[in-house]
Image (cartoon, rainbow, N blue to C red):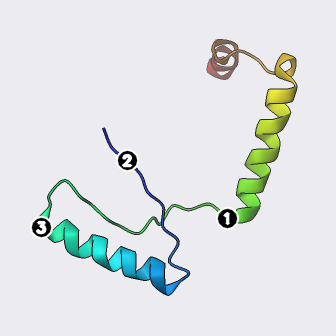
Amino acid sequence: MTYTIKISDTSEKAKSIIRMLKELSKDYSFLEIYKDTQSISEELEKEIDKRLLFVESNPETGKPWQEVKASLQK
């Protein structure tokens, strides 16, 4: 099992934790720490949340994946 922990480096305390984890990762092969370069913008995250809320509130407006896939393969 793999765990993901997100730490924003916006404070000194957070940066300190990141440094500590980087040091620990040198001694423990099961620990990896890296900077996430695939973050999405706050604006995009809000849009995704908005669309998710719409889909959850209006399930009848969607189509099954098999139907969408079949129409794309035509």
Find numbered disc 3 in the image and state the secondary structure of the residue it sits on.
helix
Q: Look at 41% across and 69% down and name the residue there.
A: 35
Tag 2 secondary structure = loop
The crowding category of the residue bearing disc 1, from other C-alpha atoms within 10 Å (few below 14, some 14 to 19, many at least 20), is: few
The residue wearing badge 1 is 41
Task: Please state the horizontal and vertical placement of residue 74, each as a whole percent of the image.
Answer: 66, 17
The residue positioned farthest toward the bottom in the image shown: 12
Gap between marks 1 and 2, in whole Å?
23 Å
Check disc 2 and report the residue beneath it: 3
Q: Residue at x 63, y 19 (%)?
A: 69
Q: Earlier in the sequence, mark 1 or mark 2?
A: 2
How would you rate the neighbour count of disc 2 (Cα within 10 Å): few for under 14, some for 14-19, many for 20 or more? few
Instruction: Specify the label residue 27 is tagged with.
Output: 3
Residue 70 placement: quadrant? top right
Which residue is rendered at x = 62% and y = 19% of the image?
Answer: 73
* The quarter of the displayed image where residue 62 is located: top right
- Residue 52 rendering spot, x and y as whole percentages: 76, 37
